[in-house]
Amino acid sequence: MELSLDEIESPIGVILLVAGGGAIHALDFADCAARLRGSLEARYGAVALRSAADPHGFSSRVRAYVGGDLGALSGIPVEPGGTAFQRRVWAELQRIPASATRTYGEIAASLGRPSASRAVGLANGRNPISLVIPCHRVIGAGGGLTGYAGGIERKRWLLAHEGALPAPRGESGRAGGLEPTRPSLTA
């Protein structure tokens, strides 16, 4: 399979966007390139990634999002693969608006499986299309920032960027900073 690859500069590092057939197939950070490639190969077998500038206009929309247009990612077609349950979780994540968060338990309950919060967490962690399927908007039951495959500091930046950073108990909720980085594309 041949897909298009673009690299997008952002305040939280270089973002890799993989698209084809009018949909995004993967979106991750350059320092997570091995995970991105592994996800694609697990779904498609051998994959050829061809450099392309702004495939389907998706890169421009990601740039707009990190630049402050929080609605820029809405409605982008995605092809994440996954099991039926994972796809249900990822669809539910896409219903979380920018500037809002949900807990794993709330997502499980919305899927009619209130005891499946751990399964929701596992599906959330396997999301191959970061940002567009906004797994960063899922927080712990106590409001804490729990796991994020791109790193907790990126999750903190994204939630602060969206105005959704929860104030931890006993803290001001100040987001703190994440300096721009240039991660290596080598895995």
Image (spheres, rainbow, N blue to C red):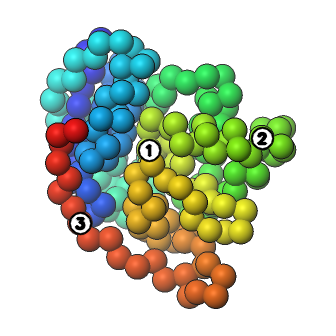
**Badge 2 amino acid:** Ala
C-beta proximity under 8 Å, tags 2 and 3: no
Residue 25 in view = no
On screen, residue 17 versus residue 125, left or right, reads left
Q: Where is residue 68 in the image (x, y as percent from the top left)?
A: 37, 64
Res 22 → quadrant: top left
On screen, residue 62 versus residue 161, left or right, reads left
Q: Which of marks 3 and 1 is nearer the N terminus?
A: 1
C-beta proximity under 8 Å, tags 3 and 1: no
Q: Residue at x 23, y 31 (%)?
A: 5
Which residue position is annotated with label 2?
Answer: 116
Q: Dot 3 lies on which element? A: loop
Disc 2 crowd, CA 10 A, few/some/many (<14, 14-19, 20+):
some
For residue 13, above or below residue 144: above
Which residue position is annotated with label 3?
Answer: 180
Q: Which residue is drawn at 23% across and 66% down?
A: 180
